[in-house]
Amino acid sequence: MVCHFSSAASDLSGPSKAIPLRLTTPSNACYTPSAHGRVQQYWKHFGDYGTVGLEVVLSVLAGLLGGRWLDKKFHTDPWFVFLGLAIGIAAAVRALYRTAARAKRDAVSEELKQRQERKRFHERDDD
């Protein structure tokens, strides 16, 4: 892929000259629809992984508040709070595990895509 950029030296001396620049990876190329799609994908991942903290906090709080409510209802003061806390922590750990597994799957998928792009790029370069 060849992109044209103007050099900094030519910007100072007069009219800009377009210099062909061969890039080694297609992901560093000029703006393309696929590069725009990657940016949107990064924001999507940010939203997916950014909510895990909220999920952890809400899981633990729901367990604690549910346990407290049950303790007040059945007059069994600390027992349901401990049970609710344990359930909330287990739910939080499960959320973290699911997120880590999804991140690993996404990383492997992205690595495979990049390998295929590099292979196609180098095959095109050899022709």
Image (cartoon, helix red, strand yellow):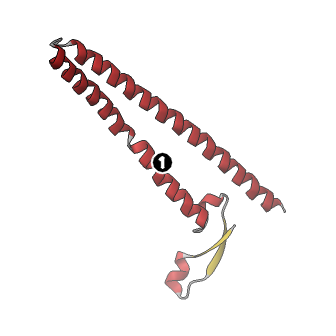
Question: In front here: 70 or 46?
Answer: 70
Name the amino acid, label 1: His
- Image coordinates of residue 47 in percent, x first then y, are 42, 48
The part of the image, by quadrant, that contains residue 20 is: bottom right
**Element under label 1?**
helix
- Image coordinates of residue 103 in percent, x first then y, are 52, 39
Q: Residue at x 38, y 26 (%)?
A: 91
Which quadrant would the N terminus be assigned to in this image? bottom right
- Image coordinates of residue 2 in percent, x first then y, are 68, 70
Tell me if mark 1 has few (under 14), some (14-19) or many (20+) residues whose alpha carbon lies within 10 angstroms of its own: few
Q: Residue at x 28, y 29 (%)?
A: 62
Q: Residue at x 82, y 60 (%)?
A: 126
Q: Residue at x 55, y 57 (%)?
A: 38
Query: Total number of numbered labels?
Result: 1
> On the picture, is 56 further left or further right than 108?
left
- Image coordinates of residue 125 in percent, x first then y, are 78, 61
> On the picture, is 1 further left or further right than 79?
right
> On the picture, is 104 further left or further right than 120?
left
| Residue that badge 1 annotates | 45
Question: In front here: 118 or 10?
Answer: 118
- Asked if residue 89 is positioned above or below residue 32 in the image, the reply reads above
State the residue lying farthest toward the right. 127
State the residue lying farthest toward the front. 73
- Asked if residue 104 is positioned above or below residue 32 in the image, the reply reads above
